Image (tube, coloured by chain):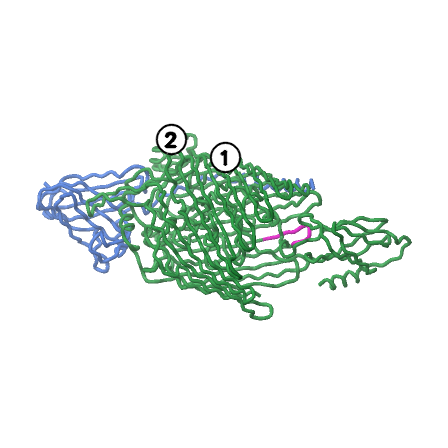
Amino acid sequence: MRSYTLLILLLCSITSFSQNCDNTLSGTVTDLHDGSLLIGATLIVAGIEQAVDTDLNGKFTITNLCDDTYNIQVSHPYCLTKGFSVKVSGNTTKNIKLEHHLEELNQITVVGKAFNNKSKTILENRISKEELERFSSGTLGDALNSLSGVSSLNTGNTVVKPLINGLHSSRVVIINNGVRMEDQEWGSEHAPNVDVNSEGNLTLIKGAGALQYSGDAVGGVIVAEASKIPVKDSLYGKTLLTGASNGRGASLTSKLTKSYQNGWYVTLQGTLKRFGDFETPDYILSNTGVFERNASLQVGLNRFDYGIEAYYSIFKNEIGILRASHLGGAQDQIRAINSNQPLVINDFTYDIIAPKQDVTHHLARIKGFKNFDGFGKLSLQYDFQRNNRLEFDIRRGADKNNASLDLKLDTHTLMLDLVSHLTDEVNLKSGLMARHQNNFANPNTGVRRLIPDYDKYDLGIYASADYRLNDKLLLEGGARFDYNKMNVFKFYRTSFWESRNYDQLFPEIIVEELGNQVLTNPQLNFYNASSTIGATYAFNDKYKVFFNYSIASRAPNSSELFSEGLHHSASRIELGDLQFKSEIGHKIALTFQRNNEIFNFSVSPFVNTINNFIVIEPTEIQQTVRGNFQVWEYRQTNAQLLGVDFDASYSFAKNFRFNNQVSLVKGYDRTSDEPLISMPPINTKNEIVYHNPNFKNLRLALESEYLFRQNEYPNNNFEVFIPETETMEIIDLSTPPNAYHLLNFNSNIDFKATKKSTLTIGFKITNIFNTSYRNYLNRLRYYADDLGRNFSLNLKLKY
Amino acid sequence: MKNLNLLAFAIFATVLFASCSNDDDAPAPVNEEEVITTLKVTLTPTGGGTPITMETRDLDGDGPNPPVVAVSQNLATGVTYNGAIILQNETVSPPENITEEVEEESLDHQFFYTSGDGLDVTTEYSNFDTNENPLGTEFTLTAGEVSSGTLTFTLRHEPTKPNTGLNDAGGETDFTTTFNVEVQ
């Protein structure tokens, strides 16, 4: 490669004769990305075949040059060889920038660079590509679940919502390839619309410290990024096929990348996943199949100091919801809860019928960046997302096959970001964001809109800086301001409108009164400020401490503001409140880390105090013609979450490693002094891994997962009259299920398939002992057990 | 550099204003057609006489107002009545008859009658689905001894058929209502 470049340079070099040939060309060679000096870079001047190396200060000097234009080739062991054309006139100085760390950094990185230091004072947890590939047939939530401090709020086993230090949904922001996901994430049974196979790695930031993405991540930020593409002529790809016994399904995913020396690249990726009904140790979970189809295309140009990239992805997922979880009133609920197994168990099938979700998410993005000397990297990004969510209930008559919920959410976002290296010690990130969102609730469902039609406008501005005081201490601080405006058209039931006193409070927003409904036009404005401050101190090359304090402000979401009616899948009536204010979280996070190959650990305690925390809780029983329903009302209170995440890894013998993880979180409502609902119980994972890179990269891992029983929970039980038995019975919605222990086995081995391709065979068993268990954080735990044993075989071909 | 910044701001502003200029078309209301607001039971004495009506109406569905329940008169001891159940959606005008839909989907529906609290009545199904299992929009009711108590009507959607009663019927409740009844 190098000689080839040289040849070209030789061919196009111009030799001329001139009088003055004792000029000197000098300068330094630095890393384009961080400005560090490159020592030992070789410069070869074409035509005169003079070669010099840079010294310990990155400096070079080439003597005896004429007044002329020279072509110079610069190479460095870790850099892409580059050709330069220099006009020499007298003694000339030329500073040269090379793109260092070829294997790490040649992405199109508008935000790529920003992504490498999302927050410098919060410990970031990462899931690498190799780890991610083990979750190829699972979901994003499953993959994240492998990190300490992350659990998941499930609806069955296919709707998996990440729960970071006890918080979820609107409090967790997901950034997918630089785009903030706007996929009706407020819903606790709405899984993120992200294909785990389209991502190269996941980064988790447990806090709001990463202000470049958002100021409202009270819980945390999940950043999913595509793999980086090298700047060289190359064609590569991989195909993964996973088959699993539980659900009797498979997933197939393939990715192909073509890249060129001149910086152009294109990547095409697709996933197909199909599972039938899943099984517990004792019975089939009827109507729990899943059918997922995804594709993405990425085209871009990555040059030294500028780049442009276009990206498009489609995610389509059809998910069956356990048939036995769809209920009428409280009387049905008590039958379902009191039964040891689901009330509907049918034969295994791949068919997915109502109740089900069918979601399509389009994401298109175009971004470009340019590096300016002494100014920084400026990037501009526009993205468009369209989310269409269909939810089907069990219905009667002409509407039988009609969706009960049909929402179309369109989001346009424009972002301008600047990353500047003000000095060697100070980095500054700043930017602007403008977003418009339109939600359309299709009235053809024949069901009153769960979420009203609205237009939403967001404007954001942020700046954050880090200052490296010395080798040991780094300080970081930042602030962000967001303005949100919502223009809503909402139909209220007249009876609800009046019972809430809205007719007295907001008579001015009535547009029209239509018999038993009132059309209103609420216009809401929210002004949110958020900030972060932190420090990192390295005691030595092993021990390091991170400290971060962040304030996050979150405007209430459309569900918290406007819910007003029966939520079928939860079998309860949910009521929002038009008068909510923004929720403000103060999170203090500390991490003490030991970094070492043999033995490393990190301890991360945190306190998250949230004012105006929006919580939903039961308030009364309401009679309807379907029977009694519990009414759950959103309410604002002050909450506090405390916890600690612990990770440790110890290589106790050659090729053997022991990993341990413990996550603990406690959540309290400080106003009522009650525990918060749906807080993950303490859990611990212990794993023994044998990994031999010298023998076909063999990896064997045995993992034990122990989930304690949640002992702190609010009592939301209620009584209901059962006509058949003429008794009042307590519906126990509160008591958490018992602790459980699962054992999992995971293995993989590499084989050279051809000269250029590797076949990796993976074999996995989850729940080896086929334990029956229920998880407190699974919304379907009232009705059915969790999954039984599963064998899965994973074939990966890299080419 | 300045130009680039300006350009970016220009694009920002354009997108913002373009999106702000959205028209404010008011959305169409949704009148739920599947809703059952009203259940009317008409009990006609087999030997002739004034029919007794029992009615439950909840015009705001799962809104905050509870259903209104009314029974026209007491049952007479020893009398057998032919019962007929009418289900209506009164949120639309004219009111929609839901009984027809239930009868069309007879395999997916069944009414259950539960007497409680000491009420002495017996019931029997008078109409059946296409598999000859009970449907129950029509029934006979015989009033026994003088007594008082509750009479509950429950409509189950997608029940297990055949079944021995509410306990093993499964499915989900589409409508349930309890009347306070007296036998004189």
Q: What quarter of the picture does the N terminus of chain B occupy?
A: top right
Q: What quarter of the picture does the C terminus of chain B occupy?
A: top left
Q: Position of residue A707 (x, y in %)?
A: 39, 51
Q: Position of residue A142 (x, y in %)?
A: 45, 54
Residue B158, image quadrant = bottom left
Q: How crowded is mark 2: few (under 14 residues within 10 Å), some or many (20 or more)?
A: some
Residue A10 visible in this rendered orientation of the protein = yes
Task: Identify the disc placed on residue A28.
Answer: none
Judged left or right of residue A116, residue A720 is left
The kind of residue tagged 1 is Phe
Residue position for label 2: A503
- Pointer 1 and pointer 2 on the same chain: yes
Picture mark count: 2
Main secondary structure of the magenta stretch: strand
- Residue A511 versus residue A390: which sits nearer the camera? A390
- Residue A724 versus residue A457: which sits nearer the camera? A724
Q: Is mark 2 on a helix, strand or loop?
A: helix
Residue position for label 1: A526
Residue A360 visible in this rendered orientation of the protein = no
Q: The green chain is which one?
A: A
Chain at tag 1: A
Mark 1 vs mark 2, foreground winner is 1
Q: Position of residue A794 (x, y in %)?
A: 48, 64
Q: Where is residue A312 in the image (x, y as percent from the top left)?
A: 55, 54
- Residue A337 versus residue A357: which sits nearer the camera? A337
Query: Real-space Cα distance between discs 1 and 2?
Result: 23 Å
The kind of residue tagged 2 is Asp
Range of residues picked out in magenta: A302-310
Q: Which chain is blue?
A: B
